[in-house]
Image (tube, rainbow, N blue to C red):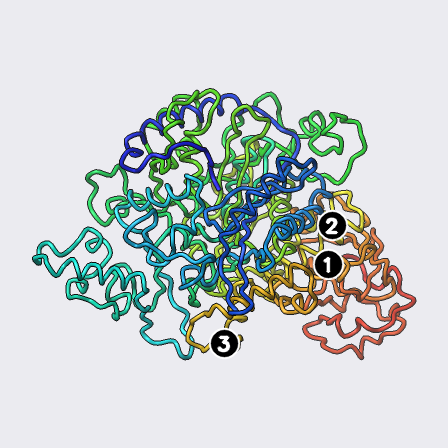
Amino acid sequence: MGLLSLGTPLPWSEAYKHADHVRKHGIIQFLNIWRKEKTHRRTNLLWGDEIEYTIVNMNKGSHKARLSLHAAEVLHQLQEDEKAKKNYNASWKPEYGKYMIEGTPNQPYGSTINDLLTVENNMKERRRLIREKLNKDEIVTSMTTFPTLGAPDFVYPPFLPTPDSGSSQSLYIPDEAITSHARFPTLTANIRKRRGSKVAINLPIYKDKKTPSPFLEPCPESLAKILEKENNINKNLSESEKISDLSKKLFTKIINSNSDGKQSLPEIVNDAKADHVYLDCMCFGMGCSCLQITFQACCIEEARKLYDLLAPISPIMLALTAGAPAYKGYLTDTDCRWNVISGSVDDRNEEERGLKPLKNARFKINKSRYDSIDSYLSPGPQYFRNHQFKNHYYNEDYKENHCCNTAHHHSGDCKGKEESHISDCCFPSVNHYKPKYNDIPLVFDKDIYKKLLKNGVDDLLAKHIAHLFIRDPIVIFNELLNQNDKKSMDHFENIQSTNWQTLRFKPPPSNSDIGWRVEFRSMEIQLTDFANAAFSIFIVLLTRTILAFNLNFYIPISKVDENMKTAQVRDAARTKKFWFRKNIIPTDSQFKSDGSHKDEDEDEDIYELMTINEIFNGNPEKDITGLIPLIRSYLSSKRIDTNTFASLERYLYFISKRASGELVTDAVWIRNFIISHKDYKQDSIVKSSIVYDLCKILEGINIGRQDALMRIHSTVGDGVFGSKSIFSSDHINIINSTPFCNYYKKNCLPCLKYQCITHPNKICQHLQYKRFVHLNLNRQRRKYCNHRCFLTDVDRINPKLLDESLLPSTNLNTITNINNNEIDLTSIKNQDLSSVHTLPWLKQEIIY
């Protein structure tokens, strides 16, 4: 998690005095690395994932599941193994919670298709390595949030919260639950002190049949003790002396009436609201787990392009990976962690939040340090001008001379045999960005902005950096105050790493071969290694597809913010619509000769509310192209063997079904598990016994127990049973792909050719690609089957394209479900068409 420097952390009373020093030298450090790296090109994709695991103590006798602080010792043992063993497959870091362990691959994944196939096994290996170090009564889970975090007796060994002392001063969470690395307790204390009060998050309660209305949280035991202490002090004081500093910031006036703690929480605590669950410290947010993907771009322009085009995707991925329906022992009416973390690190004081006029603060700031991005970067100017482009799609000269897509780029052998490579490294000469997309006011430090411009940084990148630097550094180590700005990036990273946004644009580190990177940060962690691997692979394949087809996802940044709010609504993936661009495939008519957009192309800028199913799977009736078919089209252009394609299709199939709503999110699955549990009383309260049974199921899933796997089928589908469960090794034979065709608006994707060699004499149900994939059946021969290769619910073709005389065992008059000149193929899928091999009865061309 962020910059993990070591040293003596300064308390906020000292740290704030050095804020300008850190900002000044942070900008110098950025400029030094920018001058050195702005024209540097790297030819191979490197990427990695980050998973935050949770260790749970399982008490079989009491039927309780509690967060285990033994994780700190487990982490130490894992790190020792990492140092000592060669060819070790994992790397370990501390996370905010002492019950958490951060795991990443020890080396980044490479740029071939086969590298993608190692991801799930690496994740399983990480989980196995952790499990080997655990006590017999412990398990490792990958839950976004532990449902009873902050509830009574949620941690093992047990500790009590200390609301009147310590780093967090929480009513619910003891400081012992925070990792002891100096960064974490210092972050906690300094955020609270800079803000001028404790953080406050209120989540709407999930209203069930027996949930009180209004719902009023009871007063926790820790608060009752404080009230008793305050009342004892107040007995001997005058009215003007009674209110302590703690009381002023935390309590309502009722505390001065000798409260006995029997009142509800909203009656006593200023920030607590009726019908809400109150969370009061950083651990409620930073104690959550997520799935993050970082990938290296070939150049700064490519990194900026991917940063921009993934921004509209980030809220949609948040909704699709939602996994946090319960907090502090209550079911809430939200499914995601995002707003909780955002509120838990919100260090803005009252002036910065707009509650008071600006007097001492420098800016009014609209968002927490943890939120969605505020501006697009655009690909920017071409800093490296020694290469000229031949067309809008890619630079052939650069590709040939720099081995962007060759198999032997590691050895420098440019003449070697090509493999299935996914490093479509190119200069993004097609610039889809328009200034109107940055449609929200951007707060930035004007002095820093001017300095960056003066040193040659372009306008949008200068504003981005100057916007990050409106924040104060929260953790400053005394020993690191004075640095060599030519060799260190610590001051820059101090501020960069505490701007926790949906995406992070990452400059190269000092003295390293690492390039410009983008970190995708919005996704919630999934319950299974299969699902975590699927979403990781999806994001990487999406970036490659964006580059290969020059896709355009730009919408106004205000609509991205709106989508972030929508994404966190309960079951948003199935019930809500999101703003998304309709025309994501560019046409030559949109561009000037220099690759920039024509201003009058307003029709190409249409964006509308779409379901996630439409965004991912497409909707031919609305002429919407889906992301999943686009990725499949991209893969079809690669030299992929049948085994590899079948393995990747297992992940894409899962995400397609999750997007369609046939598979529910983890949040929906957990909520349903809780609601259907025998100990749940329809009152929104999540008991520890329920969490115990939930954790038992999750452990069974991740060790491959069949009964547990069946329980989670509704959220991950058949894919969790393994690669052979649906897609056999010889299931799909990809024959070839054709260049861009001109049949459909001059912008359809490379045509896909599938041949099922397992059941060559059956009609296949797969007609998923609809209009945006063009199949010319006069030129290509097909064989279809009814195997479960790519099942869709309703697949139809036009009967006018059928020649009845060439259907030997099927009479068209007997086929059911004829509607609007369409035939439902499911009605003939089981009929034997033994003499049909190349389907000559499909006349001419079909646009699927």
Kindly identify which residue carries mark 1.
722
Q: Which type of secondary structure does the marked residue at label 2 adopt? A: loop
Kindly identify which residue carries mark 2.
751
Instruction: Say whether marks 2 and 3 touch (CB < 8 Å).
Output: no
Residue type of the residue flagged with mark 1: Gly
Q: Is residue 587 visible?
A: no
Closest to the camera, between mark 1 and mark 2, is 1
Closest to the camera, between mark 1 and mark 3, is 3
Residue type of the residue flagged with mark 3: Asp
Placement of 228 over or under 105, stated as above or below:
below
Kindly identify which residue carries mark 3.
679
CA distance for labels 1 and 3: 33 Å
Q: Position of residue 150 (x, y in %)?
A: 40, 60
Quadrant (top left, top right, bottom left, bottom right) of the C terminus: bottom right
- Quarter where residue 704 is shown: bottom right
Relative side of 351 to 384, left or right: left
Tell me the crowding category of disc 2: few under 14, some 14 to 19, or many 20 or more residues within 10 angstroms, Cα based.
many
Q: Position of residue 688 (x, y in %)?
A: 48, 68
Residue type of the residue flagged with mark 2: Cys
CA distance for labels 1 and 2: 29 Å
